[in-house]
Amino acid sequence: MSRAEERGKPLGNPYDINGPYFNPDMYLQKILKESSLKQVMDKETEVVRDTQSLHSEMQTLVYENYNKFISATDTIRKMKSDFKKMEDEMDMLAKNMGSITSFSESISSTLQDTRQHISKLSGVHTLLKRLQFLFKLPSKLKSQMEVGNYSEAVRDYLHTQRVLEQYGNLESFQGIQQDCNAILKELMDQLRTKFKSQDCSAKEVAESIDLLLQLSEPAEVLCAEFLNHSESRLVTQLQALKISPGQDIIEFVDLGSSGFLSDLCFVATSFTDMFVNKSNYHDEEMSAKLSFFVKTNMDKYFELVQWRVELEQEVGDTAMLVRALDRFHRRLTAINTLTADTDFAMMATEIVIRAGRRQCRSHLHTLKAHLADSLTSVRQSLAAPRLTSQEASTAAGLSTELVTSLVLSTVEKIKGVLQDLKVFLQPELAFMSKRLFVESFCVESVRECLVVGFIHHLTATARSFTAQNQAVPCPTLALLLILTKMCLEFESTSVQYLLKLTDEWFNVEEHCGQIMQGWTDQSEICTELRSAAQDLVNHYVRMQGLAISQMLRKSVETRDWLHSLEPRTVRAVMKRVMEEMAMVETQVGMLFEEGSRPERSSDSSRKTHSRHQHRSLTNWSSHSMAATNIHKLFSERIEIFAPVEFSKVSILTGIIKISLKTFLECVRLRTFSKYGLQQIQVDTHYLQLYLWRFVADENLVHFLLDEILGSAINRCLDPVLMEPSVVEIICERI
């Protein structure tokens, strides 16, 4: 496309009446060409109306902004006049600056010589002031020493030391230097005397050492003297802390923190600033000396704290002890940065752990004493009724309430002890964040040492009553039953309750995980308790059987069986045996259940107890004895001392087996006449009438009584038995 064509091409729409490229001729031609007459007239009317509207709006705008136009015009006119005035002032300022510059150059050239002279005079004046300071230095040093202002004296001397060393060979300065040296020697002596004084504080000691170091005293010597004096002061503080009267453990910890620990921290900090951080000293050697010093004194402090904690635990205020341990641990944690090679926070945690362990042991001793007192009370309650009557003792002394009271009081005592120890686990305590303490205290000290340890002690105490060399009076036999029942109660419910309570209160699983090595399992404790209960009930059966056996043995050994009279009644000892068995049945029945036994025949009480009673002397032959021996071979063997079950029937059966076995052995050792044999016949029949109701299997009683009568027949010189009907009549009259 040519440039002419580009110039002829319209740049915009010529028909847009509001556009910048509007062409009225082209627009008019288009309207006339495309519109009708009516449309042209309407368009004219529209254009006229729009024109009038625009004129009206323009007039409105002019009226509204008239004042603004006037104000803008005035402002422009004023700015023109102000700028013209400013140009005049700037011209005048430039002229004045030029005049000032010329005057300054003229004055400088005039005063050049005078300025050099003034500079020389100022230098001379400064030198004279320094010389005046040097001449006054000895008197000034002495006056400052008299008022105790040693730091100012050292600073003044160090300020002039270089000048004195440089010009000390001049005659005019030799006297000043000699005086200063003498005063300086006296100053160092006073500083040494000051920091060696017992009344001097740790801060004053550090200041004295620092001044001596500034005076170029040997660092090694000052280091040793500083540590020795500081150690003597710290030892004195520890001794005063130990013998302070009337203070509780919280005051003890506060005094130790504000006194000993504060001074030790200040000594360590001062030593580090004065000796370790100095570039001209041996840092490693000085650090080693400081570490040894701090560790030695901290060990002494830990020993004192351990002693005081143990002393406080004898008093027994656990809450105050825990508060003191918390403050102690916080303070030790704060000063843990004294030395890099020693963890004082860990040592403080170990002291807290030992305190918790000792507190648990103290409570364990309390529980042991409570158990001993409870058992003493039980024994007294069992023994007291015997002062009135033996029957009343059974009813008033031995009961399930006595066992329940013993178990509940022991469990409540353990709960009280655990409640007291919970103060060690308050969340705001500083040492609660140490997992080592939580694991050691909750698992080792509380659960294992205290709770499990006490249960082991309870078991051992119960077993101690089964010792063979122990004299067991009658109340102790009832105590054996109570201890047996107590062990069974702990085995069935109390152990599980106490271990669960301990795990919940001390968050054992939360702090120490689900599985911990070294835990004592509940089943192991229960097995041990049940074993102890078994030993106790077995011992009770043996002792009670022994008591009845003694009566039977004496009744057999003290009687002259060869000269016995014809029996008319049952011997009194047999009645006493039945009374004793009735009392034992009452005692055992109060604590233990009946137990299982087979059904008995309806005529058990009337059954003739021995096959020998149905034989006449003529029937008793060697053939009968052989048949009896064959019967023994095929009979079930009776275990006399077999373990018994925890039931009334089993316990009474065990006692009867021991008693009848003793009776049998005593009969085998005696020789009987006819009437002696008949007396044994009457006695065994009487026992058969009443003993069957105590045992689980009445055939056992029949068998043993048969053995007794058979042995008496074998040991009889004239074996003639009494008629069974006569025997029954004699026994029924009792």
Image (spheres, helix red, strand yellow):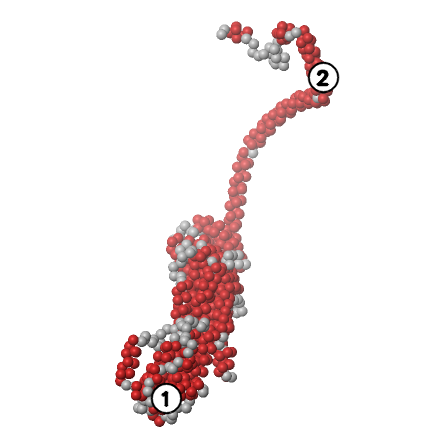
Using the image as rendered, state which of residue 293 and residue 270 is in the foreground: 293
Using the image as rendered, state which of residue 222 and residue 675 is in the foreground: 675
Which residue is disc 2 drawn over?
A: 56
> Residue 722: which disc?
1
Using the image as rendered, state which of residue 344 and residue 438 is in the foreground: 438
Image-quadrant location for residue 79: top right
Q: Position of residue 100 (x, y in %)?
A: 60, 29
Q: What residue is drawn where x is 37% and y is 92%?
A: 564
Q: What residue is drawn where x is 46% and y is 51%?
A: 161
Residue 321 position (above or below residue 386): above
Q: What residue is drawn where x is 35% and y is 82%?
A: 610
As shown in the figure, which amino acid type bears the numbered disc 2? Ser
Q: What residue is drawn where x is 30% and y is 86%?
A: 619
> Residue 382: which disc?
none
Q: Earlier in the sequence, mark 1 or mark 2?
A: 2
Q: Is residue 588 something that shows in the picture? A: yes
In the image, taking residue 29 as reference, residue 444 lies left or right, namely: left
In the image, taking residue 163 as reference, residue 612 lies left or right, namely: left
Residue 184 position (above or below residue 410): above
Disc 1 element: loop
Residues at discs 1 and 2 in contact (Cβ within 8 Å): no
